[in-house]
Amino acid sequence: MNVEVEVLNRYSEGAKAKQAALCCPTSYDPALLALLPEEIIERDYGCGDPTPYMRPGDVVLDLGSGVGKVCYLAAQIVGPEGRVIGIDMNDDMLALARKYQGEMAMKLGGDRVRFCKARIQDLALDLERLAEHLHRHPVRSLGDLAALRELERRERREHPLVPDGSVDLVVSNCVLNLVPDADKPALIAEVHRVLKPGGRVAISDIVSDEPVPERLKADPLLWTGCLSGAFQEEGFLKAFLDAGFLAVRYAEWGKEPWQVVEGIEFRSVVLTAVKGAGTPCLDVGQAVVYRGPYASVSDDEGHVYTRGARIAVCERSFRLLTEGPYRDDFIGITPMTPRDPVPWCAPAGTRRAAADTKGALVTSVNGAGGCGTGGCC
């Protein structure tokens, strides 16, 4: 089975007529939907709503944007200071999304959405630029093919469609499971590449409770129906951890399976994570206190936080724990007069003496806080 061809064919059909089998029931904010053309709403296929994870001013990248529904919803949330980029490889889906671009720009008061043709596992290569080149220089020999491959490498390097560190939030709605298994690590690495330091992901997708056997993976209907290409539920988290993400978690988990095939449960989830800040570990005398209720917890990089103890942390870990995704679980303590920064990464469980933090500035005392930049030593 050629996965890419099967996916292209089925979703081309889905762009021309509604395919109920591709939909996992999902609710969206009616106020956001009100601006969208009915054709866009009807021919959208997904398994979750990523809009709660968007913020004003964000640059949002939607992987597998299809007819553009999530992009047009995102454009309303990010506002005039934000931008939205939709990536899809299907010409029919892109044509339908672009059909309403002018109308939506008028409704939104500005054109802040663009749709691009690319494979989501290769976000640097603009397939429309490549197609223009092939029209002028068709491949007729092995030499032509070698030249094409070199052009692709140069395009990725010199004219990346989505540059490194250019996106605040990557979202996707039931699309990662459509990518061939061999390409999934490259896909997640690409997500990490394009995010800014501290950037976030909110991926709605289908996961399986057990590994999917090869005979089911070979079924075109099951694969293109977002089932047999699904990550196994533990493996989905691990794939993002292996790519270097932090704070990886299931923010949402379908109460009931969407479908059960040969006893394997397939359910919708939303995975969230952050990209580290990528800055040096600098100690200025800060500490965090883990609130509980567990006796202790450890993070993805081996730091251990004992309930109630003042644990020494570097500045970027402090920001992640008190301003980022862990902010409801930690109290931050900053010296009234911070020390001169010293390169240092505290060994696991290192405590900060109370004498070092008396009269300190205490933050997140009620478990509230803003969004941090992410990162850890």
Image (spheres, rainbow, N blue to C red):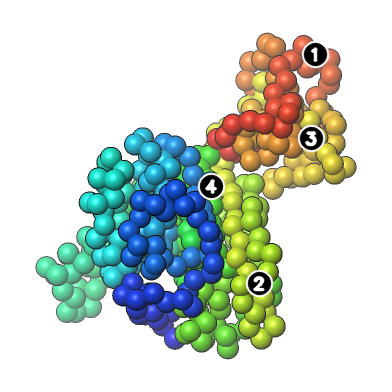
Relative vertical location of residue 210 with respect to residue 205 in this rendering, above or below: below
Disc 2 residue type (three-letter): Pro
Q: Which residue is mark 2?
A: 257
Nearer the camera: disc 2 or disc 3: 2
N-terminal-most mark, 4 or 3:
4
**Residue 160 in view of the camera:** no
352 with respect to 211 (left or right): right
Per the model, the C-alpha gap separating discs 3 and 1 is: 18 Å
The residue shown at (56%, 78%) is 228
N-terminal-most mark, 4 or 1:
4
Disc 4 residue type (three-letter): Pro
Nearer the camera: disc 2 or disc 1: 2
Q: Position of residue 200 (x, y in %)?
A: 53, 46
Disc 1 residue type (three-letter): Lys
Relative vertical location of residue 93 with respect to residue 333 in this rendering, above or below: below
Q: Position of residue 107 (x, y in %)?
A: 29, 45
User: Would you identify the image quadrant in which residue 275 lies?
Assistant: top right
Cβ atoms under marks 2 and 1 closer than 8 Å: no
N-terminal-most mark, 2 or 3:
2
Per the model, the C-alpha gap separating discs 2 and 1 is: 52 Å
The residue shown at (34%, 36%) is 80
**Residue 375 in view of the camera:** yes
N-terminal-most mark, 3 or 1:
3
Disc sitting over residue 276 in the figure = none
- Quick one: 69 or 361, which is closer to the camera? 69
Local crowd size for mark 2, using a 10 Å CA cut-off: few (<14), some (14–19), many (≥20): some
